[in-house]
Image (cartoon, helix red, strand yellow):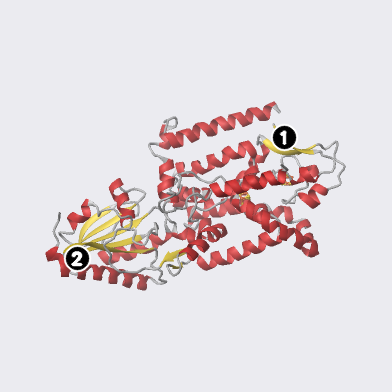
Amino acid sequence: MKKMSVVQVALLVLIAVSFGELVFDFSVYEELFLDFNIYDDVHDTIVSTLCLSCIKLDPVSRLDFVFETGNGEEHPEFVWKNLTKGPLFIEYRSDVCKACDDMAPIVKDIFNVSFEKEETLYKLVNYSGLNIHFYHINLDHASQAQKDSFPIYDKDNIKGVPMFVVITVKYDRGTIKPCYTAAYGTLGLDTDEERRDLLIDMIDDGVKLYEQNREGYKYP
Amino acid sequence: MNLRFRRLISQVVFFFSANLGFKIEGIFPGLKTGFCYPFFYCHACPSATAACPLRAIEIGVYEGKWNWKLIFYPILIISFVGVISGRGVCGWACPIGLLQRVTGKVAKKLKKKQPFLKKLGQHRLEPYLRYLKYIVFIGLVVVTPILVGFMFTDICPVGYLVGTIPISILNPGEFSPNEFFYIALVIFILFIVLIFTVERGWCRYLCPIGAMLAPFNKVSKYQVSVDKDQCIHCNICSNEACPMGIDVPNMERDPECILCGKCIEACPKDVIKFEGR
Ligand code: SF4
Ligand code: SF4
């Protein structure tokens, strides 16, 4: 009986120290665990992000351009600024996401860009003679400002990845303002061809709106 | 208050604490934490408070990237409750255990009416089926995510039950099935058939969290023990009470015991008890 108690106490101490290290970063096992807050990571990337493969569903894409942001916050600074030169296309993803892996080659092909999935990339690309600000944002490796932009453009409040966003400008009650649309997952479509066509439609609509309204857009 | 009622209260309290993530506009912001559940429940549930430990492990090992923190974090949480109470969490806290408490009543009646189900339960190969859960855990939570990127949570029946179904109902017309939907649906139907035909069928044979918790029964502080000298081998505990189909009179820190205490209540000689040692 005593032997068992020793085993139990030893296990509990080991678990408590390791857990404390993981959550509070005491740096006991510095080499192994580095500087990384697991509690926030699990909160941000698992609990607060809807995993589309866990729900076995894809959101139905409605490609209307809207002004109201997903969480009611203002558009971020980099969006306001970039809109002076062209519309934006943002692809949000995470490390572990089957649909993101399926969609990445389509996006690369449309914009003729290349990137690793862990990479966060910005590039000004030429699309049908127009500049498009291309962003590939991996939420597991992005800056805080980039992470904060995710709920802003989560149009349908899905909190799921991959999320494709086109941001452009449009007329609204006397002013030209930023507007955007978002699509999610594998876009609810079965073949790569259909997915590609839908993404292109979405981008083309954004480009058209930009061309119609660019003259009136003012960077505040 | 009898044991059965105390356990029910505990299960209901844990069920509600696992579901505090819902938002009521202007009244309750919803509690979304960064913990992993120490039992089987899914963060895809709209009201989930924490993460599924299996998903965290899968992400941790995905494509051999070895994110050690994500691997250890859920393992440590489960180990902690495991060292204290072994699979007691299955009997007293897990919402899927609560669900099977309800379906188990049907399974028990069916077993009495359908002799073939009884025979199936006593088949000499039945104990080997219990190893399936270890294969599911190692195979689908660890090996396939590393090798081919396929994960247990892609087809998990509990994700279907508490994620897919409520999300589809709450957002009609907003979602369409993805590539895993139909296979997950088939697995979900099999899951429902299993839990309605075999008492605690999921916990006995397939639950990967049960597989993680089971070895801790060998060292856990709390356990159920039988005074073998006093036992008269009436087998009421095994035949009438135990939902896990354990040979209770001969058990010694059995990895299947979920500490539900049904055998304690059923024993006419009072020779079974909870023990903390
Ligand atoms: S075996 Fe799995 S489903 Fe059953 S009670 Fe334990 S954690 Fe829950
Ligand atoms: S042995 Fe007793 S406590 Fe353990 S699962 Fe069976 S009935 Fe419950």
Q: CA distance from mark 1 to mark 2?
A: 73 Å
| Quarter of the C terminus of chain B within the rendering | top right
> What amino acid type should be assigned to the residue bearing mark 2?
Arg
Q: Residues within 10 Å of mark 1 (few under 14, many from 20)?
A: few
Report if the CB atoms under discs 1 and 2 are less than 8 Å apart.
no
* Image coordinates for residue B120, horizontal then vertical, percent: 76, 60
What element does badge 1 sit on? strand
What element does badge 2 sit on? loop
The chain letter under disc 1 is B
Instruction: Residue at 40%, 48% (x, y): give it.
Output: A44
Q: Is residue B96 left or right of residue A129?
A: right
* Image coordinates for residue A217, horizontal then vertical, percent: 14, 62
> What amino acid type should be assigned to the residue bearing mark 1?
Glu
Res. A220 image quadrant: bottom left
Can residue A143 be seen in this snapshot?
no
Q: Is mark 1 within 8 Å of ligand 2?
A: no
* Image coordinates for residue A159, horizontal then vertical, percent: 39, 56
Can residue A165 be seen in this snapshot?
yes
Q: Which residue is mark 1?
A: B275
* Image coordinates for residue A3, horizontal then vertical, percent: 68, 27
Disc marking residue B207: none
Q: Which residue is mark 2?
A: A173
Q: Residues within 10 Å of mark 2 (few under 14, many from 20)?
A: few
Q: Is residue A132 left or right of residue A15?
A: left
| Quarter of the N terminus of chain B within the rendering | top right
Between A7 and A198, the one lying in front of the other is: A198
Instruction: Residue at 21%, 52% (x, y): give it.
Output: A78
Q: Is residue A82 left or right of residue B210?
A: left
